[in-house]
Image (cartoon, rainbow, N blue to C red):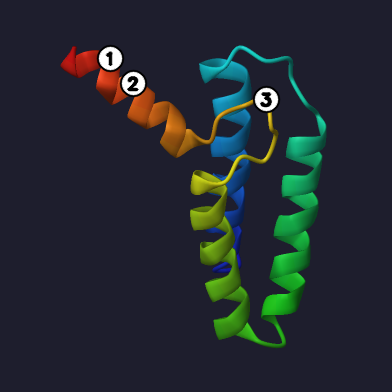
Amino acid sequence: MARSTGPILAMGTITLANRVIVNRQPMDWRIPVATGLAAGAFALMEKGWEAGTVATAWLALVISLFIRLDPTVPSPIEQFTQFTEGIRT
C-alpha cells in the first residue's frame, strides 16, 4: 500500500462519519467514491514524487478537519468544540 493511502482514507472516513453519524445527514455516496479515486490517484502520483505526494495527502487530511466541506455540516473540529463545551457546562 502506498504511504499516501492512509491519510486519504482517513480523510474520507472522518468526513463521512462527521456527516452521517455525528450530524445525522443523509448518506452522500460521492464521498466514498471520491475517496477511492483520490487514494488511487495519489498512489499513482507517489511513483513519481513520493515526498510531495505524501505531504499533500497529510495536508489534505488536516485541512479537511478544519474546513467545512459542506456549508450545512460543521467541520469535525467545530463538532468536537461544541461537544467539549457541552461537557464543561
Residue closest to the far left:
88
Q: Which mark is residue 86?
A: 1
Q: 10 Å neighbourhood of mark 3: few (<14), some, or many (≥20)? A: few
Q: Is residue 17 left or right of residue 29?
A: left
Do the residues under discs 1 and 2 have CB atoms within 8 angstroms?
Answer: yes
Amino acid marked by disc 1? Gly
Relative to 20, residue 40 above or below? below
The answer to whether mark 3 and mark 1 are in CB contact below 8 A is no
Which amino acid is tagged 2? Phe
- Of 30 and 67, nearer the camera is 67
Disc 3 target residue: 72
The quarter in which the C terminus is drawn is top left
Q: Nearer the viewer, residue 27 or 72?
A: 72
Outermost residue, bottom direction?
Answer: 48
Mark 3 or mark 2: name the one nearer the start of the chain.
3
Q: How many marks?
A: 3
- At mark 3, the secondary structure is loop
Residue 75 spot, x, y in % from top left: 53, 36
Q: Which of the two residues, 11 or 37, is positioned nearer the viewer here?
A: 11
Circle 2 crowding by C-alpha within 10 Å: few under 14, some 14–19, many from 20: few
Residue 19 drawn at (x, y percent): 62, 25
Q: CA distance from mark 3 to mark 2?
A: 18 Å
According to the image, label 2 marks what residue?
Answer: 83
